[in-house]
Image: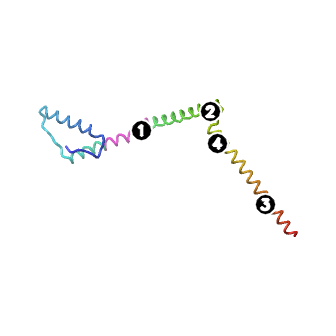
Amino acid sequence: MAENTSFPGLDPFMKFWSDFMGKMAATGMPSFQPSPDMLNQMRRTFFDALAEQADTFMRSEAFLAAMKQGMETSLAWQQALNQFLQKGLAAAQMPSKIDSDHLVALVRGMEERVLERMDELARRIDRLEAGARAKA
């Protein structure tokens, strides 16, 4: 039998069938040695059927409902963990990511207001200088 290197993990499957055929031959059954092409065709047929069944199962309502429930459970667990960590940081009087994000937003808002005020003052100074040049 030809060794198959294109499908890792197939060795136990092929060993099972070759042992099975060997035991059948030992009991007096006629020996049948399929050609490599026939083995490849059998393998291809087996894997095509397996892929079709897996695809059908993964599109089933039961599987999709289980995946949805798993995702919802995972998100709920993550939110609970975040709340627990937030409470722990608050109890230790340490800033959390939420606190630092809020602080950054406040500083950016102050920066924007200061820059707007500076732009307004620059425009007023330009008007005053233009008026002074017009008088001179």
The kind of residue on which mark 4 rests is Asp
The kind of residue on which mark 2 rests is Leu
Q: Residue at x 23, y 44 (%)?
A: 3
Closer to the camera: disc 4 or disc 1?
A: 4
Q: Which residue is mark 2?
A: 89
Residue 88: quadrant of the picture: top right
Pointer 4 or 2: first along the chain? 2
| Label 3: how many Cα within 10 Å (few below 14, some 14–19, many 20+) | few
Q: Which residue is mark 4?
A: 101
Badge 1 marks a residue whose secondary structure is loop
Q: Which residue is mark 3?
A: 123
Real-space Cα separation, disc 4 to disc 2, in angstroms = 15 Å
Is the residue 110 above or below the residue 18 in the image?
Answer: below
Q: Along the horizontal axis of the image, is 106 left or right of 12?
A: right
Quadrant occupied by the C terminus: bottom right
Residue 129: quadrant of the picture: bottom right
| Label 4: how many Cα within 10 Å (few below 14, some 14–19, many 20+) | few
- On whether residue 49 falls in the magenta region, the answer is yes
